[in-house]
Amino acid sequence: MKNVSESAIRSVYDSLLRSQAGFCACERCREDVVALALNNTKPHYVSGASGLGEVITGVNMSLDRMRAELTVIVLDAMRKVAANPRHAP
């Protein structure tokens, strides 16, 4: 079983990280952003190694509207993590 929202959020995070020069790119900050973003999105689970459900959900996740919504959610998570980082200085 796989939550395809997670891979979409990671993709959005990776593209946003390039434009957010001051944001810490350490693994802990990355995982904190992904966790916060996932907690603020509806999960989209698929089962099987590579079934039709995963393909359909993947296509839906690539739609501009969905990507825009995820961008807002990930940016908000990045702001929260930047304000309270949990990594060592």
Image: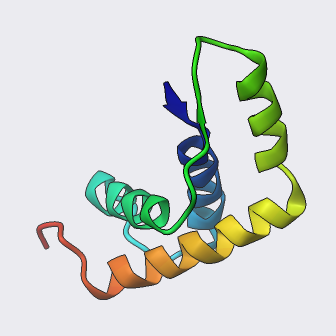
Q: Nearer the viewer, residue 64 or 48?
A: 48
Q: What x and y, as percent, mark residue 66? A: 78, 61
Q: In which quarter of the image is residue 74?
A: bottom right
User: Is residue 39 shown to the viewer in this render?
Assistant: yes
Number of callouts: 0
Whether residue 39 sits left or right of residue 50 in the image: it is left
Q: What x and y, as percent, mark residue 31? A: 35, 54
Q: Which residue is drawn at 84% across and 39% down?
A: 59
Would you place residue 77 above or below residue 11 in this image?
Answer: below
Whether residue 58 sits left or right of residue 46 in the image: it is right
Q: What x and y, as percent, mark residue 81? A: 34, 77
Looking at this view, name the residue that lies furthest to the top: 49
Whether residue 21 sits left or right of residue 70 in the image: it is left
Q: Which residue is drawn at 49% across and 24% down?
A: 1
Q: Nearer the viewer, residue 7 or 2?
A: 2
Q: In which quarter of the image is residue 33?
A: bottom left
